[in-house]
Image: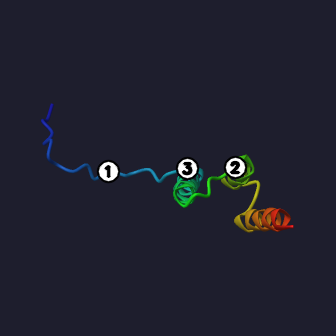
Amino acid sequence: MEDKNPYELDTGPVAAPHPADVRRAQFAQANASLSLEGMPVDSADLAIQEAVIAGTLTPDEAVAKYLERARGASQ
């Protein structure tokens, strides 16, 4: 059995993260930023985000839903 140098970098292949995990992390970052600005997300926002993560809603469709909600709230 060969001793492995503990200081040697492992240069083996690294699995790419799943796209849903990347998108979920991006939404978490955006939600944290919004929260710091005093604009916390609600359950409807989270539902839209989960639909985008799941792929049942495109980002453009999500923007349309957000615009629809904003227009409804301003009336």
Residue 38 at what x, y percent from top left? 58, 57
Residue kind at label 3, given as amino acid type: Asp
Residue 39 at what x, y percent from top left? 62, 58
Compared across the picture, whether 37 is left or right of 45 comes to left
Residue kind at label 2, given as amino acid type: Asp
Crowd class of label 3 (few under 14; some 14 to 19; many from 20; radius 10 Å): few
**On the image, numbered disc 2 is attached to which residue?**
42
Q: Which mark is residue 70?
A: none
Q: Work out whether residue 15 or residue 20 is closer to the camera in this orientation and state it.
A: 20
Report, in whole angstroms, how far the alpha carbon at label 2 lies from the one at label 3.
21 Å
Residue kind at label 1, given as amino acid type: Gly
Return the disc, 1 or 2, that comes first in the chain's sequence.
1
Crowd class of label 2 (few under 14; some 14 to 19; many from 20; radius 10 Å): few
Report, in whole angstroms, how far the alpha carbon at label 3 lies from the one at label 1.
22 Å
Position of the N terminus, as image quadrant, is top left
Residue drawn 76% across the image and 54% down it: 56
Q: Which mark is residue 21?
A: 3
Kindly state the secondary structure of the residue where label 3 is placed: helix
Kindly state the secondary structure of the residue where label 2 is placed: loop
Report, in whole angstroms, how far the alpha carbon at label 1 lies from the one at label 2.
42 Å
Compared across the picture, whether 54 is left or right of 21 comes to right
- Asked if disc 3 and disc 1 are in contact, CB closer than 8 Å, the reply is no
Most extreme residue toward the top is 1
Return the disc, 2 or 3, that comes first in the chain's sequence.
3
Mark whose residue sits in front, 1 or 2: 2
Kindly state the secondary structure of the residue where label 1 is placed: loop
Residue 20 at what x, y percent from top left? 60, 51
Mark whose residue sits in front, 3 or 1: 3
Compared across the picture, whether 57 is left or right of 29 comes to right
Mark whose residue sits in front, 2 or 3: 2
Q: Which mark is residue 12?
A: 1
Residue 32 at what x, y percent from top left? 53, 54
